[in-house]
Each structure stands twice: as structure tokens, then as C-alpha cells.
Image (cartoon, helix red, strand yellow):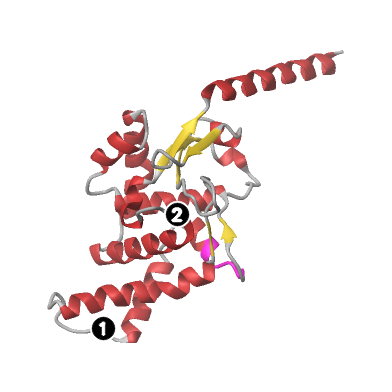
């Protein structure tokens, strides 16, 4: 992730969603995509779903390109503001998400992929503190489903799953919801979060190191205050 100009938008104990991966030869939390390519490929994901429905007799008629373009425009204009801002950047190559953009993507994605069985998912493979994640998921993720039709949610899920599969190289992309993990902002910002590649990309928070860093920061602040008083 890129550094953030206004980190105060996150508080020390805020829960963050992360995608541990092995995209650069070693376990990491980075996530970089090409915004223009993501937008360009969205119609393909929608078209594939609609063509499948038509061939299986689920849909009574095929969709025209104009109708698909209309669906694309409708989706792109209603995404979370931070995600829309990221996708609209005129950037020729892959780009890292800022923390706010990263969280906008992850929260929307999780609102979709964990909705049906989120109780099972987070109890078994996500946050250690189930109550903490439950509260976070209900307050920060579930509201992002509002205003979307079931068809639109299916389109977005297919799109995000496919794009993240290409950028993250998970061992089993069809099970991407098992790889989404949680950590806390303060611990991540302090550099005390690591990824275990041999245990299903588990996120490990080094709380002892974090406490030592916070103690050093407090001691430094006291020294500065004393110096200013003198």
C-alpha cells in the first residue's frame, strides 16, 4: 500500500481488511492493479455471466452491447467514492492502492463474498475476536450492499474476484474469501504485521513489538515536553 497523506482518518485500533498474497515472490500485503484495465475488463465479466444465463435458458433473451455498456456505466458511477477515484486515475501501469482506496475495495468485496456465510468464514479463518469482526462487518461492510440488485452484486463479485486473482496469485483463486484477513491499523502502521505464507497466508500481529514501539514513542514525547518546559 502507498503511504497515506492523512493517516488520522484511521484510528489506532480500527479493524482493517487485507489480502495477504504471494504476488511478488514472497508473502506480502501489497495490492497493485492497472485501473484502466480493470474498467476495460468489466464488460467482459458481465457479458460472460449474461451469455451463460442465455445458453442455459435462465435468461429469455440475449443482451445487446448497448445494454451491457449501460450496466457498466451504472456500476462504475455507484461504487464507493474512494474506489471510483482510484479507477478514474489516468495511470498507464499498475498502481498501488492508498489505505483508503484499499479499504474501500476490500469492504465492498467482503460485503459481497462473505454475505451468505460470513458467520462461518470469520469464525474460522478471519478475526481472532469474533465479536470485534462481527461489529465491524455489520457496520462497515453490509451497508455497502444497499442499492445494488442481486444481478449487479453478481457482476461485481465476478469482476473483483477475477481482477484480484490476476494481481495476487493465490493458490486457489476460487476460494479467495478464505484469504481475506483482518488486522489493526496501529499495528500495521507500526510495521508489526507479517504474513505467514505456509499457513494459508495468515496475518500475524506482533503485539509485543508494537507495545515496545508505543512505549518508546511515549518516552520520546515526555522528553520533548520536558525540553520545551525548560
Residue position for label 1: 63
Where 212 sits versus 32, above or below?
A: above
The quadrant of the picture occupied by the C terminus is top right
Assess disc 2: are there few (<14), some (14-19) or many (≥20) residues with their C-alpha within 10 Å of its C-alpha.
Answer: many
Check if residue 73 falls in the magenta segment. Answer: no
Residue position for label 2: 105
User: What residue is at 55 percent from the left and 47 percent from the top?
Assistant: 99
User: What residue is at 57 percent from the left and 31 percent from the top?
Assistant: 192
In x, y percent, where is residue 177?
A: 33, 49
Where 109 sits versus 54, above or below?
A: above
Q: Are marks 1 and 2 in contact (CB under 8 Å)?
A: no
Q: Which residues are magenta?
A: 85-91
Where 28 sits versus 205, above or below?
A: below
User: What residue is at 83 percent from the left and 18 percent from the top?
Assistant: 228
Tell me how far mark 1 sits from mark 2, CA to CA: 28 Å
In terms of image quadrants, where is residue 221?
top right
Q: Quick one: 149 or 178, which is closer to the camera?
A: 178
Check if residue 86 falls in the magenta segment. Answer: yes
In x, y percent, where is residue 70?
A: 36, 78
Amino acid at each position: 500500500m502507498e503511504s497515506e497523506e492523512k493517516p488520522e482518518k484511521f484510528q489506532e485500533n480500527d479493524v482493517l481488511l487485507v489480502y495477504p498474497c504471494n504476488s511478488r515472490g514472497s508473502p506480502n500485503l501489497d495490492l497493485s492493479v492497472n485501473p484502466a484495465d480493470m474498467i476495460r475488463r468489466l464488460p467482459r465479466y458481465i457479458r460472460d455471466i449474461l451469455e451463460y444465463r442465455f445458453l442455459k435458458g435462465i435468461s429469455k433473451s440475449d443482451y445487446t452491447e448497448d445494454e451491457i455498456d449501460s450496466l457498466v456505466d451504472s456500476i462504475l458511477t455507484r461504487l464507493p467514492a474512494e474506489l471510483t477515484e482510484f479507477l478514474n486515475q489516468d495511470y498507464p501501469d499498475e498502481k498501488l492502492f492508498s489505505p483508503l482506496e484499499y479499504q474501500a475495495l476490500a469492504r465492498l468485496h467482503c460485503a459481497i463474498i462473505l454475505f451468505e456465510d460470513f458467520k462461518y468464514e470469520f469464525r474460522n479463518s478471519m478475526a481472532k475476536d469474533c465479536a470485534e469482526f462481527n461489529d465491524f462487518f455489520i457496520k462497515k461492510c453490509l451497508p455497502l450492499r444497499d442499492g445494488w440488485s442481486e444481478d449487479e452484486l453478481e457482476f461485481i463479485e465476478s469482476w473483483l474476484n477475477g481482477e484480484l486473482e490476476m494481481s495476487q496469485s493465490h493458490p486457489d483463486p476460487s476460494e479467495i474469501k478464505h484469504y481475506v484477513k483482518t488486522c489493526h491499523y496501529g499495528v500495521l502502521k507500526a510495521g508489526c504485521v507479517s504474513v505467514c505464507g505456509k499457513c494459508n497466508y495468515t496475518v500475524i500481529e506482533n503485539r509485543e513489538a508494537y507495545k515496545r514501539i508505543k512505549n518508546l514513542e511515549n518516552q520520546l514525547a515526555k522528553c520533548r515536553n520536558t525540553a520545551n518546559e525548560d
